[in-house]
């Protein structure tokens, strides 16, 4: 059984892989990580977050083939049901045995206009459905160049966790993803990543919810994570995992990232 600080490596497939490709990807990933995923207690938890159309296929593959991957989703609507064409609720995802739900990814915020308040409502919905939210925070290149990284990230953390209890915060995941590093090939230096994760994520949790919550909340880094930089990132004291985009689409690359401890 994983504890709250067991490293979490998550693959966000975004709008890639139809359900046939998703099945093949998960089966190969299960083969490549077979020994790692069977460790007890686990040294790492690996989650995959396919598009909505793939989730049922991935679920049945994981369960029938007994692959110890955690199933994730990329988004959800905060309401349980209603006249919201094209949306999917947290309760629907829970019925598919989803474990983790990405909430407030920068692409949702930047491209689809999601506000801090809307993201916070999703966090509450995911927790109510007894799943774990992965709350995404991060700054744009302009905000970084203007020296506003700390204010932006800390503000998103506070807003995203509003109304939660300390014990809830201690069990969830916060992913720091500098927007300027997503899909660009650019990665924050390990020092920068550690600084933000420590000073503007974990320290904010400590100030708002106490030291115990700060000690157990998992903080991921995301933004052009690759097999070549994962070990250095994971060596940082306040980085407990990675939210991986493009590299998670290739089972070989994603397996190499999940095996960062062997580097």
Image (cartoon, helix red, strand yellow):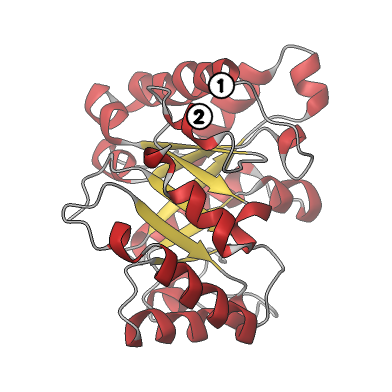
Instruction: Give me the disc on residue 258.
Output: none
Considering the image in quadrants, where does the N terminus appear?
Answer: bottom left
Q: Is residue 234 above or below residue 48?
A: above
Q: Which residue is mark 1?
A: 190
Total of numbered circles in the picture? 2
- Compared with 226, 20 (above or below) is below
* Whole-percent x, y for residue 52 in the image: 60, 76
Question: For residue 87, which quarter of the picture?
Answer: bottom right
Q: Residue at x 54, y 55 (%)?
A: 254
Compare residues 17 and 82 and report the one nearer the observer: 17
Q: Is residue 134 visible?
A: no
Q: Is residue 98 left or right of residue 53?
A: left
Under circle 2, the secondary element is helix
User: What's the distance in space between the residues labelled 1 and 2, CA to CA?
Assistant: 6 Å
Residue bearing mark 2 = 233
Judging depth in this view, the residue of 62 and 93 nearest the camera is: 62
Task: Give above or below for 120 relative to 144.
Answer: below
User: Are circles 1 and 2 on residues that touch, CB within 8 Å?
Assistant: yes
Quadrant containing the C terminus is: top left
Of 177 and 137, nearer the camera is: 177
Going from N to C along the chain, the mark reached first, 1 or 2, is 1
| Of the pair 141 and 86, the residue shown nearer to us | 141
Can residue 10 be seen from the camera position used here? yes
Q: Is residue 176 left or right of residue 234?
A: right
Q: Could you classify mark 2 by the number of other residues whose Cα lies within 10 Å: few (under 14), some (14-19), or many (20 or more)? A: many
* SS state under label 1: helix
Q: Residue 161 at what x, y percent from top left?
A: 44, 39
Residue 48 image offset from top left, x and y in percent: 49, 64
């Amino acid at each position: 059984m994983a504890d709250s600080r067991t490293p979490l490596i998550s693959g966000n497939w975004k709008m890639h892989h139809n359900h046939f490709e998703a099945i093949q990807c998960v089966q190969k990933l299960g083969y490549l990580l077979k020994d790692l995923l069977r460790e007890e207690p686990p040294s790492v938890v690996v989650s995959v977050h396919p598009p909505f159309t793939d989730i049922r296929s991935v679920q049945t593959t994981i369960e029938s083939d007994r692959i110890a991957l955690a199933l994730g989703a990329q988004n959800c609507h905060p309401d349980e049901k209603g006249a919201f064409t094209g949306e999917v609720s947290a309760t629907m995802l829970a019925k598919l045995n989803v474990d983790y739900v990405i909430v407030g990814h920068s692409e949702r915020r930047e491209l689809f206009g999601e506000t801090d308040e809307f993201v916070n409502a999703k966090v509450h919905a995911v927790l109510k459905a007894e799943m774990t939210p992965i709350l995404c925070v991060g700054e744009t290149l302009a905000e970084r160049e203007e020296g506003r990284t700390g204010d932006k990230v800390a503000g998103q953390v506070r807003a995203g966790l509003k109304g939660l209890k300390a014990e809830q915060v201690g069990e969830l995941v916060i992913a720091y993803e500098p927007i300027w590093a997503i899909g660009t090939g650019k990665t924050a230096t390990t020092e920068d990543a550690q600084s933000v994760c420590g000073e503007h994520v974990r320290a904010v949790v400590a100030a708002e919810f106490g030291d115990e919550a700060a000690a157990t909340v998992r903080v991921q880094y995301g933004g052009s994570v690759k097999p070549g930089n994962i070990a250095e990132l994971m060596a940082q004291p306040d980085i407990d995992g990675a939210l991986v985009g493009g590299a998670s689409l290739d089972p070989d690359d994603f397996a190499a990232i999940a095996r960062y401890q062997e580097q």
